Image: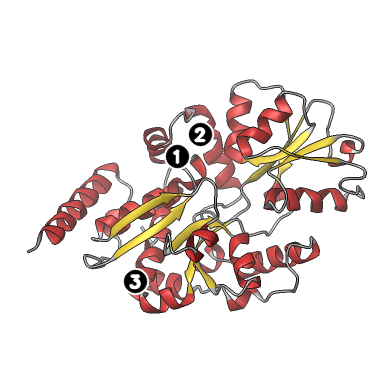
Amino acid sequence: MNDKRIKSAIAHCGLTTALMVAGTGLAHSQEFDLAETAVTIGTAQAQVLNVGTLRMIEMLEGWGADVTRVELPSISGLEAIVADQIEVAARSSDEILTGQSRGVDVVAIGAPISTMHYAVISAPGVDSLSDLKGKAIATSGPGGFNGMLFRYMLSREGLEPEVDVQIVSVGGSSERAAAVMAGQVQATVTYIDNWLAMEEQGANVQLLGYVADLVPGLSSRAVFAEREYLDQNTELATAIACANLEVNAWINSGKDNFVSYVNDNVRGADENAVEKFYDVAMSVDMFPTDPQMLLDTSGYQSLADLMYEGGELKEQLDASGFIDSSYLEEAANMGCGKG
């Protein structure tokens, strides 16, 4: 047995033992032989929202895969795929639509989270979206999905962005939240976990609502790769799908393991805020174990329609052409995600 296989076997035994001790149920998952597989996966930074991705990668490594995780703070997963920096991305769903519109045949095969992960927060006195007339909101910048989403919500309230409401480019989720706290703007879209951490710290901001409730049915994040790569690596694709189902089942099995894992793997995580995040995630079914709910074609179609209406896509797209749930279905038939 060569060194790589020895390392893979040791890693697999260690992961299996750890999962059995933790009582997660993941030790009963389908086995895969990925000892000859190397893959580079692009992700967001380690945060509460993507702990599922971290767990998926651990499972792939436990099955022998040589996984390199690359955090992508300044470029999208789509851009990293096009630049040959990564093979697989676990990033925002809108990147798939952007890719398809530009002739990059990327396909979704899973989803780290399946419902929209944003919260709309505001300064005191702004108690509804309609109260933003004559005020300012923060976005990440031109072309950002969060800005397009906020513009859509404003338009539904009869407010014209840039005319009735000033749009200020600020930066990432944390920077946008800070701008609200500093009084530079009166509202923004931020990650749910950012909002909950602010609430826990007693920040002088309030929740207008979760986007999953305000604009229901939108896809959030996806695991995706180029179709040609998936066709050439079907066992890896099925293993990723299995890990996705297994991790979702683990998350749904109880709060304690989830909170403990986040505290161990996400720097600066606030335990009380993580517990609240778990409750919100359960209430909006963020981690389903049914393949059709986990990778819901209608959610991607709704997202495509919204992006088309918002001018982010020049033509309408048919989501059924780039959503492939067959790997999840195959993994589910193997028993993945069944506990």
Q: Judging from the image, what secondary structure is the residue with disc 2 in?
A: helix
Q: Which residue lies at the image location 22% right of the left edge and 68% below the top edge?
A: 36
Residue 312 appearing in the image:
yes
Residue 222: where, in percent of width, then height? 53, 60
Residue 207: where, in percent of width, then height? 72, 34
Q: Earlier in the sequence, mark 3 or mark 1?
A: 1
Q: Which residue is mark 1?
A: 255
Q: Which residue lies at the image location 43% right of the left edge and 32% below the top edge?
A: 267
Display colour scheme: secondary structure
> In this view of the protein, which residue sits in the foreground, 61 or 241?
61
> In this view of the protein, which residue sits in the foreground, 279 or 121?
121
Q: Which mark is residue 33?
A: none
Q: Which residue lies at the image location 41% right of the left edge and 33% below the top edge?
A: 263
- Disc 1 marks a residue whose amino acid type is Lys
Q: Which residue is mark 2?
A: 275
Q: Judging from the image, what secondary structure is the residue with disc 3 in?
A: helix
Q: Are marks 3 and 2 in contact (CB under 8 Å)?
A: no
